Image (tube, rainbow, N blue to C red):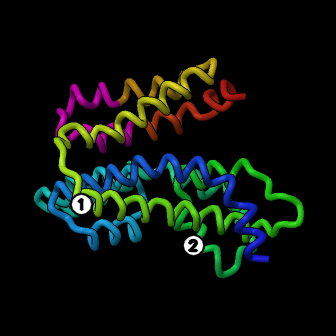
Amino acid sequence: MKLKSLKAAFPYTIPIMAGYMFLGIAYGFLMKTKGFGLGMTVFTSIVVFAGSMQYVGLTLLTAAFNPVYTLFLTLMINARHLFYGISMLKKYQGSGKLKNFLIFGLVDETFSINCSTQPPAGIDKTKFYFFVTLLNYIYWVSWSAAGNILGNFITFNTKGLDFVLTALFVVIFINQWKERKKHSAALIGLISPIICLLIFGQDRFIIPSMLLIITVLIVFRSRIDKEAE
């Protein structure tokens, strides 16, 4: 039964595996350039398992430790997971001992599959969701490790490589913009950081930007929901 569920889940995760190949290897390379070996790379990927925050964490690991700033920055960057969790309450209901891992592994890509995909007939939904989550988790850890290992043998100018995550978000933003007729939410996400950048400066604008975006989205939630419909 478990093998059957694994076989059913695997095809849905192939695009994620391909995407993680580039992002994970890039992360492993960057960790290597910052002086972190395979052990630290694998450890952060296993424990943190948050691509965007791991990239941001590269800067935090090499800067003066500021626990309060790190805490709030992590909360703001990953605040979207609160909404992921709420929307998956019914789907993960009755997951038993697998529920903790399903919650831990609810990253963007896993959410997109488990939220929108109906498990094939005859497949236990909890096991299906579990294997989607597990496979994506394995992909990220494995590609991160591969990138760090390759960093021992391949040397090139890595200047600008840390821009990979920014480039990814730009592509996602453009795709979302094209898919939607109304752009209120996108404009909120675009204008708020610009305002905060002008007020707080480039070293302190991220947390105020996240707070402003969340506040505005909550205030105008009903209007945005109507536009989405």
Circle 1: element type: helix
Image coordinates of residue 144 in percent, x first then y, are 37, 60
Residue that label 2 marks: 101
Who's the residue at 22% across and 25% down the image?
198
**In this rendering, does residue 99 appear at all?**
yes
Secondary structure of residue under mark 2: helix
Camera-side residue: 120 or 25? 25
Vertical arrangement, residue 27 with respect to residue 4, above or below: above
| Residue occupying image coordinates x 22% and y 63% | 67
Q: Which residues are magenta?
A: 193-212
Residue sitting nearer the eye, 203 or 18: 18
Residue at the disc numbered 1: 68
Mark 1 and mark 2: span between their CA atoms? 27 Å
Specify which label sits upstream in the sequence, 1 or 2.
1
Quadrant the C terminus occupies: top right
- As drawn, 36 above or below 224: below
Q: Amino acid at mark 1?
A: Val
Q: Image quadrant of residue 65?
A: bottom left
